[in-house]
Image (cartoon, rainbow, N blue to C red):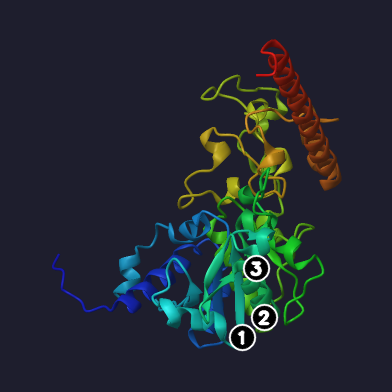
């Protein structure tokens, strides 16, 4: 095979790379929806602004960490043209400095706002800033207020943006909160659309691209707005529990539980939170349809739930015994699942309180023993 040198600018390369990532993530989604959504971006129908708050950038990495087809195929034009051009995305955008900030200062008329990471509220939000205006740093919270009021639709990318996530974990020194808590549960975009949450630590690429494509078409009145559950998540991705799709489900029903990691059997007693976690990880799978947490033998840690991480901890402690078999609970509906979830969080809170009391008694005893020194 003979390779020929090609002339490709940095901007064109970045556009092709991001466009490829979007394409690579969508092969198991509805192809017609994706193509139509991408055409809306290609023809200038809608723009995308993606801003980052308190997070580790893993959501962006997840979006770009796709495997088939190869990015080179897109760059060399071997695949149909796909363009997902982020007007602002701090990790992959080709522009920088004042040129990059212009997209936030003077956003396009029609755009979808994607927020990755939680919003810090303490100290006037100065724990996280994005750029400057007239030499003054602008906080993440200020950008969210401004842009959300002008956006056609607003999407929370990842659990941090959706519910606060790890940055909001105790003791939460920066006052980190999720987008819904920050803007309010009654928030509506310019098109009167609610906030859409795509949680996960990180979310699956399909969840992000599929939701974005659906919302773009809904904003252009070409497709229905995605159905959301009570936590603002698209039911097409978050409608079933991890437990329902787990290949170890039969072992649970038979009472065949693994006693140690690496042993055969259901990992429920090793801390798996699958029964109270809703996402299609086991049917969609990760890494190009290869694997998932529970399939690989690791417990689900409920990373798509608003209780993550504090109330989902300790990760390797079993859920309390349900009032009836989870097999029956699944047939009864989400009400039983909600009661089981509530019982688990309450028990966890009680256990953490007891642990703190034990620690306090130990400290007091030590102080008495040492004479308070």
Q: Mark 2 and mark 3 in contact (Cβ < 8 Å)?
A: no
Between the C-alphas of marks 3 and 2, the distance is 19 Å
Mark 3 or mark 1, which has the lower sequence index? 1
Name the residue that disc number 2 marks.
152
Name the residue that disc number 3 marks.
141
Q: Which residue is located at x 65 percent, y 19 percent?
A: 373
Q: Nearer the viewer, residue 303 or 277?
A: 303
Q: Nearer the viewer, residue 137 or 358?
A: 137
Q: Quadrant of the N terminus?
A: bottom left
Q: Secondary structure at mark 2?
A: loop
| Horizontal side, residue 140 vs residue 352: left or right | left
Q: Mark 2 and mark 1 in contact (Cβ < 8 Å)?
A: yes
Between the C-alphas of marks 3 and 1, the distance is 21 Å
| Horizontal side, residue 237 vs residue 2: left or right | right
Q: Mark 1 and mark 3 in contact (Cβ < 8 Å)?
A: no
Mark 3 or mark 2, which has the lower sequence index? 3
Residue 237 percent location from the top left of the image? 65, 57
Above or below — where is 19 with respect to 232? below
Q: Say whether residue 79 is visible.
A: no
Above or below — where is 203 with respect to 40? above
Q: Which residue is located at x 67 percent, y 45 percent?
A: 308
Mark 1 or mark 2, which has the lower sequence index? 1
| Horizontal side, residue 12 vs residue 273: left or right | left
Q: Secondary structure at mark 3?
A: helix
**Which label is found at residue 110?**
1
- Which residue is at the far left? 2
Badge 3: few (under 14), some or many (20 or more) residues near its Cα, within 10 Å?
Answer: many
Q: Which residue is located at x 46 percent, y 57 percent?
A: 61
Badge 1: few (under 14), some or many (20 or more) residues near its Cα, within 10 Å?
Answer: some
């Amino acid at each position: 095979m003979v390779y020929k040198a090609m002339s490709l600018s940095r901007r064109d390369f970045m556009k092709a790379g991001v466009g490829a990532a979007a394409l690579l993530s969508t092969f198991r989604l509805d192809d017609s929806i994706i193509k139509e959504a991408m055409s809306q971006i290609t023809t200038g129908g809608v723009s995308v602004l993606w801003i980052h708050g308190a997070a580790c950038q893993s959501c962006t990495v997840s979006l770009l960490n796709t495997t088939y087809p190869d990015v080179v195929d897109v760059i060399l034009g071997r695949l149909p043209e796909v363009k997902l051009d982020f007007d602002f995305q701090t990790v992959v955008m080709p522009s920088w400095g004042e040129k990059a900030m212009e997209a936030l200062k003077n956003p396009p008329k029609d755009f979808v706002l994607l927020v990755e990471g939680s919003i810090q509220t303490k100290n006037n939000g100065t724990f996280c800033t994005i750029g400057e205006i007239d030499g003054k740093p602008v906080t993440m919270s200020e950008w969210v207020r401004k842009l959300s009021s002008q956006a056609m639709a607003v999407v929370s990318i990842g659990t941090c943006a959706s519910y606060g996530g790890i940055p909001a974990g105790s003791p939460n020194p920066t006052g980190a909160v999720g987008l819904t808590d920050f803007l309010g549960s009654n928030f509506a975009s310019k098109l009167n659309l609610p906030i859409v949450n795509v949680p996960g630590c990180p979310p699956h690429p399909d969840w992000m691209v599929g939701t974005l494509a659906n919302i773009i078409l809904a904003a252009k009145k070409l497709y229905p707005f995605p159905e959301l559950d009570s936590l603002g998540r698209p039911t097409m991705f978050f409608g079933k529990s991890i437990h329902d799709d787990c290949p170890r489900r039969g072992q649970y029903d038979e009472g065949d539980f693994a006693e140690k990691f690496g042993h055969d059997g259901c990992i429920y007693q090793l801390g798996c939170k699958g029964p109270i976690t809703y996402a299609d990880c086991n049917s969609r799978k990760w890494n190009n349809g290869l694997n998932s947490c529970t399939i690989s033998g690791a417990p689900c840690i409920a990373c798509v739930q608003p209780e993550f991480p504090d109330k989902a901890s300790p990760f390797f402690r079993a859920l309390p015994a349900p009032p009836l078999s989870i097999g029956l609970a699944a047939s009864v509906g989400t009400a039983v699942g909600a009661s089981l979830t509530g019982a688990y969080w309450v028990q966890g809170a009680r256990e953490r309180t007891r642990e703190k009391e034990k620690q306090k008694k130990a400290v007091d005893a030590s102080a008495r023993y040492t004479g308070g020194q």
